[in-house]
Image (spheres, rainbow, N blue to C red):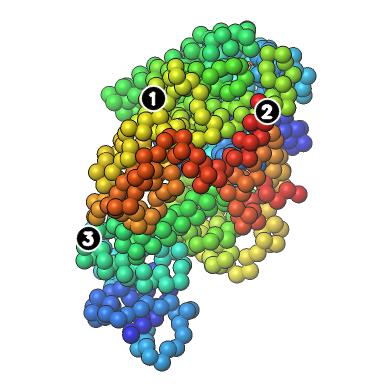
Amino acid sequence: MNFERIREKLNILADAAKYDVSCSSSGSKRTNKNKGLGDSSGMGICHSYTEDGRCISLLKILLTNHCIFDCAYCVSRKSNDIKRAGFKIQEVVDLTINFYRRNYIEGLFLSSGIFSSPDYTMERLIAVAKKLRLEENFNGYIHLKSIPGCNDELMQEAGLYADRLSINIEIPTVSGLKLLAPEKEHKDFIRPMETVKNNIAIYKSEKKILRNTPVYAPAGQSTQMIVGATGESDKDIMYSAVHYYSTYKMKRVYYSGYVPVLQDSRLPALGTEVPMLRENRLYQTDWLLRFYGFDVRELLNKDHPNLDIDIDPKLSWALRNLHHFPVDVNKADKRMLARIPGLGMKSVYKILNARKYRKLNWEHLKAIGIAMNRAKYFMVCESKDWERRDLEPQRIKSMILQSSQSKYQKMYNQQLQLF
Amino acid sequence: MTRLVYDETFEGLLTALFQVYDERLQQVAIVPVSAFQPDFFAEDIKVFTDASKADRVWQGLKPFSHLQQLIYRSYLREASGAENKILEAVRYVLKTKNEKDYGHPAVLQLADWTKEVGREKHRMEAFVRFKRAKDNTYLAVIEPDFNVLPLIAKHFKNRYADQVFMIYDLKRDYGIYYDLKKVDFVNLEAVNLKNLNAITHEEEIFYDQMWQDYFKSTGIKSRINKKLHLRHVPRRYWKYLNEKNPH
Ligand code: SF4
């Protein structure tokens, strides 16, 4: 094997793949079979973290960065003058196996630029996964990118070897997509999602009848949206996220702050700061929807189309809805406890467990590790001592902001200066 | 005050617990032999580790499987004074049956230790870095904060079913070795990093290099956040992470 050549390819093709933020390797139930290599039945492990603090769980690379398309937001676009490279199928297989055996990774995340045609590209991606599964008896995690516009049979085959399939919608609005990727059509993205969703349902129901039905994409599908490339609002983004979660049964929607990599009049200028704080607020909103029982219309609506930057979305909602508070932690149900600003679901469960044994006062709450600096304005417990003043939302907000040095404060100040 | 001096094995600890109940000791402390210091006012009793007594205690705790987990992991935490917190928690739970009452200080302490040990277990499952030896054994060296080797063996055995491997804890000077059938505990004399390097496969250097390259190219410079990075990968773990030791 020519290691120097492979090294060079790896540098180019890992660099081009890094803007896909998903690195999840959980949700599959693939166990080690016949004394083969690997197991992905666990939670998914981050084997390292990049210097920007993101989890490294998978070998995330492109098969090639040659591309016949010219999407404005993408480093690999045809008109961009960069070094191009392409892996051979066996090279990707060897790299994956060798990284996996050394416990560097949980598996492979393979994507690609589109060369010659969407179908041909998809076939090559499938060939890698197939080889790993059938020839190497590899039971690690495989995430394949679905290539927009490829045919349904290929999507069906892909799911037989991959744990997860994803297709990035990238631009949340149809008009934005027209502007930035005029050669692509919205339906080219939707079609593979639809196929994957249907196949997952079919294979699941067949499995109930025939036990040896193969599994199909056991970790489901996901998508990604770029944030801050077009003028979309947070409401636009989250409403389409909700649409993808419900219509296509997405496991995850990822939000990726746009990193300016190219000079293009349709896009933010080079050197524009990555909107990381906004990205973080969108993730918080996503969690509130998936795990805290919020409806998207409570958090974003006509009167409130964008998330607050200085406070988190739950606190923001609570300040707009003070009539629900204070909540009695000894009586309230799970749903209402989860709505107290500053309380995570872990704390909610701690409270539910601890109050079985005794009525909780402030000391108890502190002892079981409940962070109170934000929560105290919104709850009462077995104590005469609680926030009685009938405070205005603005006043609560400023007291909370004063007492908690937000980890993003510095960034927030920097970003404000830009406007 | 009675002091039960035990040999620091888990069975020894359980035997000590047996003795506390068997002899109805009230004013009692359980002391590891390495921390033992003569005390004029204490009555010291040496615990003779006994598998069947240990087993009776463990069976007796069966209805409290959560507490069992807290005890075992707190033992692996190797905190000073852990034995007496364990005893306190056992007494409280056997009396009240509330094995999840974190309002009780000893139960809470055990739960915190258990959490720490769990975190370290996950870290080691993530941070073990194998090097391939000439004879195709995959070797890794670790120095975990707590004694988590017994907890991670199953994970690695399931994952690397077709690969002979050894993970060695240098701090505690023992390792686990998988021979394609079962995992054994091993003690090796003169394990050190130097002779590990001498027996590595010639391909090792390339994969090591490529992993370092990959680590570099997958980061995004305009998003750099060293503080976050350090929170996830604290400096004390860098020693055995090849991506943090570029050539
Ligand atoms: S098709 Fe994919 S790789 Fe090609 S330019 Fe568009 S986004 Fe980039």
- Check disc 1: other Cα within 10 Å, few if <14, some if 14-19, many if 20+: few
Point out the image quarter for the N terminus of chain B: bottom left
Q: Chain of mark 3?
A: B
Q: Which residue is mark 1?
A: A298
In depth, the one of A37 and B140 nearer the eye is: B140
Which corner quadrant of the image does residue A262 belong to?
top right
Labels 2 and 3 share a subunit: no
Q: Chain of mark 2?
A: A
Q: Is residue B141 above or below residue A151?
A: below
x, y percent for residue A278: 56, 29
* B71 sits to left or right of A95: left
- The dot on residue A418 is 2
C-alpha gap between disc 2 and disc 3? 60 Å
- Check disc 2: other Cα within 10 Å, few if <14, some if 14-19, many if 20+: few
* A364 sits to left or right of B123: left
C-alpha gap between disc 2 and disc 1? 30 Å
- Is the CB of mark 2 within 8 Å of ligand 1? no
* B227 sits to left or right of A165: right
Residue at x 67% of width, y 23% of height: A64
Amino acid at circle 2: Leu
Q: Is residue A118 above or below residue B241?
A: above
- Regarding mark 1 in the picture, which secondary structure is present there? helix
Residue at x 66% of width, y 18% of height: A73
- Is the residue under label 1 in contact with that under label 2 (CB below 8 Å)? no
Labels 3 and 1 share a subunit: no
Amino acid at circle 1: Glu
x, y percent for residue B224: 67, 39
Q: Is residue B170 above or below residue A46?
A: below
